[in-house]
Amino acid sequence: MEDQTSLTPGDDLSAGDRAIEADLAALRPAAPPFTAAGIAASAEAARLRRRLWAWRGVPAAEVEAMPVAQAVGRYCIDTFESASDAVWKWYLLPYAQAAPRTVAHEQALHAYGRRDLAGMLGMLLPVGGRPRWSLARLDRRAAALQAVEALRAHAATHAGQLPESLDAVTDTPVPHDPTTAKPFGYQRTPTGFTLTSPVPPGGQPRDALRIDVTLEK
């Protein structure tokens, strides 16, 4: 089933979805959601959540007949599944395509509050950014080392001269940076060259890559 409810306001949403998102964001219960007081405080939000289910195809009569506690529970399960699917649907795409959307989704989860979003189930939502980055970082390292060897091979067959750009290397393939789907940063230095890769979306300065290579004369 297609996920019609986005957690990122204004991102490919219908007018009905935008209105529901705005209502839910404005009416997060002040009391803890899973105490008796919390459920009572959620009554107004529950009515809006019933709108959400009706929008997604649940008959209105069935929704209106639900007790508030059942309505809140149904909302939590439905929202958990949608939020979880929204993370996993990007996981198997190439990192350069998946990272910006995964980071945006996790920022939206944080803004809404993982617990408020799906009750206790919110604590079980998958985290796609850093685990996926751990795999992409290994791919980037392997690609960078392959690029280094391609440049060394070029120098060996061109009287020790390095190319002006990576495009000029034709004898050995130079892979693109898998974290950006673009060529690695490349700069010649007086003693060799430097390869670089930027900080990924949502990353830390330590996540950047820099490899300095010195060629012996």
Image (cartoon, rainbow, N blue to C red):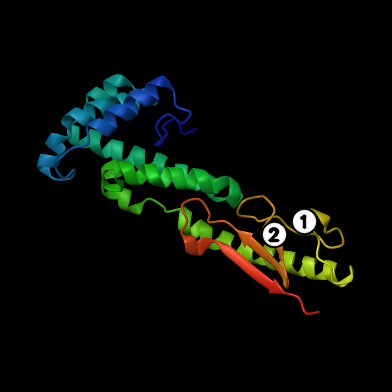
Q: Position of residue 92 (x, y in %)?
A: 57, 50
Quarter of the figure with residue 105? top left
Q: Amino acid at mark 1?
A: Ser
Residue 93 appears in the picture as rendered: no
Identify the residue position indicated by label 1 in the image. Answer: 165
Identify the residue position indicated by label 2 in the image. Answer: 186
Disc 2 secondary structure class: strand
Mark 2 and mark 1 residues within 8 Å of each other at the beta carbon: yes
Q: Residue at x 51, y 62 (%)?
A: 207
Q: Amino acid at mark 2?
A: Tyr
Quarter of the figure with residue 83? top left
Foreground pick, 177 / 17: 177
User: If you read the primary sequence from the N terminus, does the residue marked by circle 2 or circle 1 appear first?
Assistant: 1
Residue 164's place in the image compared with 108, above or below, is below
Q: Position of residue 4 (x, y in %)?
A: 45, 30
Q: Residues within 10 Å of mark 2 (few under 14, many from 20)?
A: some
Foreground pick, 6 / 70: 6
Q: Residue at x 42, y 54 (%)?
A: 127
Q: Residue at x 35, y 53 (%)?
A: 124
Q: Quadrant of the C terminus?
A: bottom right
- Specify whether 145 is left or right of 121: right
Q: Position of residue 191 (x, y in %)?
A: 73, 73
- Specify whether 100 is left or right of 166: left
